[in-house]
Amino acid sequence: MGALIGKKVVQLAAVLLVVTFFSFLLIHLLPGDPAATIIPLGTDAQRTQLRKDVGLDKPLVSQYTRWLGKFVRGDFGRYYRQFGGEPVRKRLSQALPVSLQLLVYAEVLALVIAIPLGILAAYRAGTWVDRFLSTGAFASLAIPDFVLALVLIFYLGVKLKWFPVLGYVHFGQSPTEHFKSMFLPAFSLALAQAAVYMRLLRSDMIATLQEDYILMARSQGLPTWRILLRHALRPSSFSLLTVAGISVGTLIGGAIVIEAIFTLPGVGLTIFQAISERQYIAVQACVAVIGCGYVVVNFVVDLLYTALDPRVRHAA
Amino acid sequence: MSRSARSSFAAIVVGLALVAAACGGGSGSSSAGGTSPNGSKGEGPPQSGGSITYGLGAESSNGFCLSGANLSPEGIQVAESIYDTLTVPNEKGDYVPYLAKSVAPSSDYKEWVITLRPGVLFHDGTPFDAAAVKLNLDAYRHGLLIQFAFANIADTTVVDPMTVKVTMKVPWVAFPAYLYFTGRIGMMAPAQINDKANCATKMIGTGPFTLKDWVVNDHLTVLKNQKYWRPGLPYLDQITFRPVVDPSQRTNGLKGGQLNIIHTDSALQIKDLRDAAAHGQLTIFENQKGAEVSYNMMNVSHAPFDDITARQAVILATDRVELNNIVNGGVNTIADQPFAPDVVGYVPDPGYPKFDLAAAKVKADAYKAKHGGQFNVEVETTIDPENAREAQLLKSQWAKAGINATIKQVDEATLISDAIGGGYQMNLWRNHQGSDPDTQWVWWHGGSAINFQRFKDPAVDQIFDIGRSDIDPAKRKTDYDGLSKALNAGAYDIWKWYALWAIASQTNVHGITGPDLPDGGGKQGLLASVHPMVGLWVSK
Amino acid sequence: MRNDAAAVGELLDPVGRSDFDGPLLDVRDLTTHFQTPRGIVRAVDGVSFTLEAGRTLGIVGESGSGKTVLSRSILGLSPRRQLVDPQGQILFEGRDLRPMDEHELREVRGRQISMIFQDPMTALNPVMKVGRQIMESLRVHFDMSKADARERAIDLLGQVGIPSPGVRVDEYPHQLSGGMRQRVMIAIALSCEPKLLIADEPTTALDVTVQAQILDLLGRLQSERNMAVVLISHDLEVVGGRADDIAVMYAGRIVEMGPAAELFKATRMPYTDALLRSVPNIEDPPHTRLLAIGGRPPDLVSPPPGCRFNPRCPRAGFRCGVQEPPLAPDDDNVHHIYRCWYPVGGPTGPEAEAAEARPRRVEH
Ligand SMILES: Nc1ncnc2c1ncn2[C@@H]1O[C@H](COP(=O)(O)OP(=O)(O)O)[C@@H](O)[C@H]1O
Ligand code: SF4
Ligand SMILES: [Mg+2]
């Protein structure tokens, strides 16, 4: 077990190096002089400062190690505004929790929708309930998340005024308002995921329900819900978990647009704004943070997988 | 709409463009939905207290060091809450003292004496005095782009603690208008100006609200200034400004109740808001006064537009009615000149040619005959999809006249730096907010460093030179009558339409046009894109 | 008319009635037919038997003869949506289980009647600790607290002969050997003290050495608890020494049934005879035996007319292909019943028919 984790950690470190290197390269992929691109209208002194900050005159590899050293210490560079500019770290430290909340809520919401419906569809496989749910899942897969967002905004936000259509409320400020402000964005992201999860869980669950141990549980007189939830769900959820982990990538991609639509001050909106303001140093940092986040999430999912399936755990 | 792109021209460049409507005329305000925003009918007496959230289309991420900030209209709205200006326009379009007690010229208009209103304090408790005013004016004289507008100032001197004298290089009649500059020339506390590192974020003024906190790209909150120099004002306890870049989301936020008031220049949104206002769901305030004009500017220092035949050909080949219908849903008013109808310089017939495909073809063929059979045009626009659509439409219109256009999409900063650097043929632009035409000097005078189109037109220069120093106010109003004609004779621009601005609010938000000016000065004169914050109130 | 006491008793214990004095299980004319794309599979086709409390019924028959379907039918575990017109009665302590819905059956399953399955690897949940799997039944049927249920689970693991049950209780099935897993399954099945245990090929998946241990364990637990057992196997030898009565199944029907000793001593049905004479097969897994006759059991969608065994029967006569023999008692022992026109011990079909035909021909 320990050796297994050790091996995975080494892999993780290698992947993180690759991810950070490509994020770092971003600045160098800009056409022309990065300093002139980032500061098109500023003064030469400002451009010189930027070159000095980034070390643009040094060889690429030493630039990278320098950048990585700072990145690891949480120094993500700064914005280059007409007058000064705040550290990227300050902005990210405010944005990251918002995005993490959005992702977690979206993921939880997707699972909360998908698990009961997936179980129901499997339990009622072949009936009209199952067909209804499958059709619904196909339909929601066909709707892009931002279109869904706009539809939800119109009906639930503008017409019914159930949920705010923009803005973010801190949990500490008002938990109810917080969840209300996160609902539409999270739901917009979650629905298509829920459809994917539901279909996946359904098919795995149908296979599981054929297993002898389910019959064994039934022969012991256990109630149906107990069999479905306690006996069938876990062994049916390995691929669901894997896909949920991989989907974090899809969710992150969707979150960038969703945050922009709902004016949620997360990393996505930060990137969006940084791109439109040519704050490529900030973009670089955000991309690196997101990339690393994605890699780490998948690492954690891998470990979770191990925890969920004792056979994998003990095989190590 | 194409708002995000074009407003940033405002953000950087337009800072220079304006002063305010110098001529009189009606209020220029219209109000749909039956509720008048200025408190005159149906609103009852203003009530104190309450807070609102104000949705803006752009963040002023370069901050509020006003001398260098080049604020967009959105940024000016924020600045209006924290800063006061020495002068403001009144309803007749005259510039009257506001934070100043008086602004008086010498008989030859080469010297202006600014006397200050006593007892005014900055938010940090320091007095508003002559030293502070000089510090401010000197800062503006060195501002990144504003320096060009103030280039005519020779010197500023403190006469006594309450008096500042400003000396001009040539007689300058329009100076009080420059002291307002659409609310740009706010008086900053010395503590802000002198803190070079934090000038952009350490906002200290004398205005009705004080800065509480600002998280860039998220919110900027101001609180009631308890010691404001205008008794009983402001009414609100707090305003939170929130950048909501997407125009439809701004409308949704207003309808959904997250925003109490919004600012928009999207024609399609304005159409929608008018509808909602007609149903009594919200209040809309529209103001066409001194509206900016949307146009394509041409660079005469390069082929093909160094040849007037080429310029005339594209002007004749552009069907602006079709363009307006498709791009703006027909909401905007077509413009034949850079001046809005209420602005000095506006003339009923500026001599702009009508859309005429046959004539365009003749011009295009003439150009081709001179230039080896080729007529290729490159149009620069932003990556904004609406702008790109407009450019596509132009391309297809011109193609009918045999003009071959290519579209170059760049980001806004590049578009602007190309304009400054001269590396463009034609671009999609918006500028020239209504004001004293003297303020357009920097754009079109042959002696200006930032004449982006790079023409030196003796007829144009002569009009500007006369107008700047004409001390006869009555005659001065007609000095600029030939300007649009001269520009159109040079065929420098394809004028398209006047930009629209609307301020929409929930029905319980009032006082958008502001309270009466102090000292019995009547109503404040308003420009299309900006309104004062001091008079806002909410009914309970 | 019932008196009030009886009504209260039913409320408290709606199924298991301790005052009932008939047979514990009385299966009458049970049919379980499945709808399939190929047609109707007559997996169990009119089976009847009784079982008294504390006794053991062995059911034997080749693979595919319907033993498993029969055992699952008793607990209503057959796939309901596939069932076609289920017939017959399953009287457990006098109450018919057949018409019961899932909810009612739940009170019976595990609590009154339990099952153990052939393959302990697939029949135990791989992602659940064995202790928890035992605790589940206890918590559901006895509403036990977690702590109590755990203690009882450890106790049960000890009773089924698992060493250091306090440790094993927290292990997963894959950490246990095959024999251990089967012991765990027995512990689960017996956790709620059922009156009847149905063991469907309980040792088929196990090594020969372990087989006897498990069967001995079952026997011990059965007598300790006075529990009735239906012991199912394809191997007559497994059932032989342990069942009081034996039923032989072929193609969804009981073809011979009687007290075990009688069945061995006076085998009547040629199919039973074939099972008895089957020999261990060296190449196949150790517990499989090769039937002394060739061929395969018939297709249950369209079973052959007449005696279902006749295509394979060495004794079959003409009549066997036309008329199905009834399940009738042996002349010597009314408890010994079988289906055969030409039982072992008498003339074969051709012999008998020849004997019958000759005089007739002479007559003509
Ligand atoms: N759900 C089902 N649908 C269709 N046929 C089935 C089903 N279950 C069992 N059968 C068929 O019923 C017959 C009896 O099977 P089974 O009871 O498992 O035999 P045994 O346990 O004696 O080996 C087999 O032919 C089998 O294919
Ligand atoms: S009835 Fe005939 S076919 Fe059937 S078992 Fe007896 S002898 Fe064989
Ligand atoms: Mg079987």
Image (cartoon, helix red, strand yellow):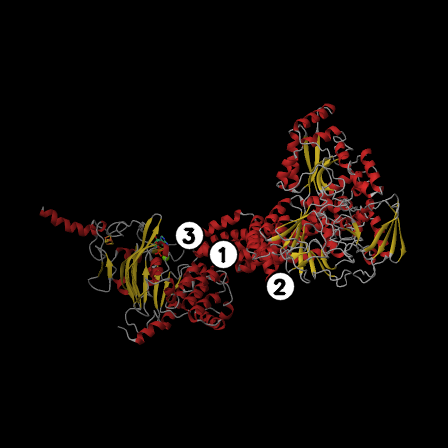
Question: Distance between the Cα atoms at labels 3 and 2?
Answer: 42 Å
Q: Are marks 1 and 2 in contact (CB under 8 Å)?
A: no
> Is residue B400 rendered to the left or right of residue A49?
left
Residue under pointer 3: A128
Residue under pointer 1: A236
| Circle 3 crowding by C-alpha within 10 Å: few under 14, some 14–19, many from 20 | few
User: Which residue is most to the bottom?
Assistant: C5
> Which of B55/C165 is in front?
B55
Q: Position of residue B418 (x, y in %)?
A: 75, 39
* Rendering quadrant holding ligand 1: bottom left
> Which of B301/C51 is in front?
B301
Q: Position of residue C40 (x, y in %)?
A: 32, 51
Q: Chain of mark 2?
A: A
* Whether the residue under disc 1 has CB within 8 Å of ligand 1: no
Q: Earlier in the sequence, mark 3 or mark 2?
A: 3
| In this view, the mark in front (1 or 3) | 3
Q: Earlier in the sequence, mark 1 or mark 2?
A: 2
Question: Distance between the Cα atoms at labels 1 and 2?
Answer: 37 Å
Residue B520, image quadrant:
bottom right
> Which of A100/B105 is in front?
B105
Quarter containing the C terminus of chain B: bottom right
At label 1, which amino acid type do we have? Ser
Q: Is residue B314 visible?
A: yes
